[in-house]
Image: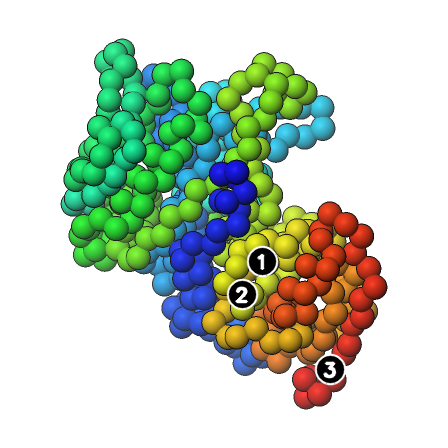
Amino acid sequence: MCGLVGALVLPSGLVLAGNSLLNSTDGDSVDVSNVIRIPSTPAALLAVADAGGRLASLQMLALAPGGLGGTVVSIPVNSASVVAAGEDPRRLYDAYVAGGIAALTADVEALLNVTFRTTAAVTASELTPLLSSIQSVTVEFDRPVKGVLGGVDTDVLPAGRQSITAEQVAKALAAIEPGAPESARLPLLKSLWVGVGASQRSPEVALTTTSSEPDSVMTTVVDGPAIDMKTFIDKLMAGQVQVWQFSGSAVPQGEANPNGLDWYALDRAEIILVTASVVPSSVSSLLPSINVQIDSPFNDAAVTREAILRLASLGVNIVLIREISDPPQQATVAASADRELEAEVATYASVLGAMEIHGDKMPVQGVDMRLTLGLDFESFVREYPSDGIISGTTTTSSPEADQ
């Protein structure tokens, strides 16, 4: 039930991130060919381990267009990794145990289809100075945050509403409750990050800091302008911070979980929904097919998720998702600057319903087709559920839109 709710509820963070991607001038530009460029939305991977070196929490940090503020995406450390044929199944936790931050990064990038600009694995003591821009955090827990300190089981933070410091935030992110499944502490981690997002902070730090990361922190910077984890976090905290936590369904003992460990399978549609909304410039196009942008005027993540599922069944790359403020129109519109794609796009009606195919007068760089969902799609979803047979639709072309 929690997984279903998590997949269907679209928080304001993704709405804000999606809307700002092409509407803001920060990082956007239109060249002489009227091609819109997606602004830079770099991603960082922050892994936090306890004193025993066990992976306690895992976060994707995403900067908003313009470089200040963004989104924190909490990832279960016991999520199933994507493995090749013939490989034994493993979790992200297992990848970290076997190969450290390098192996963990490779597995998370494969799972999310995202390339990270910066990665770091830290302990609580190493994380504390990275959070120096945080002055005070108000949180409320329905149960204590438990962990092991000095070899003794203890309450790292008590239950209830409280004001905590950056050091206490770091200790909570590094806490593993003995004997408890990760699903028990995930709500606590989400509450913690929500508190951090609404915390009192020092935004000027991000504007003046070039690199103040402690020497003990091993940061890997990949491609793009160099940015260490301390600077990345400062920039994130210098603006509005939204929070998302991936939901996971427990994997029972069997072929995918031979030893009956604490193991979770993430929802692929939810992954695409989040990554294509908050870090589109960091998403890779792996499939030998077109790149698609989804614009949804519906304030309903269930509708967007249906579009993701149906497009994914066609084997296309979904690289950008926006929730737009315009009211929904009757027709679903597929816009492409490449007229040669029209015949292929017309075949998508079998899973998307009736569409109008327009020429795209202002295409987006790296996007082959922009799909704006209409009332026709919403009706089609109700009439032809995605687990049934989808057929009997028509497609129309609107040449006047090309002029």
The residue positioned farthest toward the front in the image shown? 383
Residue on which the image places disc 3: 398
Residue visible at 71% across and 63% down in the picture: 380
Q: Residue 13 lies in what quarter of the image?
A: bottom left
Q: CA distance from mark 2 to mark 1?
A: 8 Å
Residue visible at 40% across and 33% down in the picture: 186
Which of the two labelled residues, at mark 2 and mark 1, occupies the earlier sequence position? 2
Q: Nearer the viewer, mark 3 or mark 1?
A: 1
User: Label 2 crowding class (10 Å Cα cut-off): few <14, some 14-19, many 20+?
Assistant: some
Up the image or down, 322 lies above or below 331; here it is above
Amino acid of disc 2: Phe
Up the image or down, 313 lies above or below 348; here it is above
Where the C terminus falls, by quadrant?
A: bottom right
Image location (x, y in percent) of residue 195 = 27, 44
Query: Which numbered circle lies on residue 304?
Result: 1
Q: Secondary structure at mark 3?
A: loop
Residue visible at 71% across and 87% down in the picture: 400
What is the tally of numbered marks visible in this picture? 3
Amino acid of disc 3: Ser
Residue visible at 60% across and 43% down in the picture: 268
Image location (x, y in percent) of residue 22 = 48, 69
**On the picture, is 135 further left or further right than 389?**
left
Cβ–Cβ under 8 Å for marks 2 and 1: yes
Q: Nearer the viewer, mark 3 or mark 2?
A: 2
Instruction: State the colouring used for the structure image.
Output: rainbow
Which of the two labelled residues, at mark 3 and mark 2, occupies the earlier sequence position? 2
Depth order, front residue of 311/140:
140
Image location (x, y in percent) of residue 305 = 59, 53
Depth order, front residue of 347/124:
347
Q: Is residue 183 visible?
A: yes
Residue on which the image places disc 2: 298
Which of the two labelled residues, at mark 3 and mark 1, occupies the earlier sequence position? 1
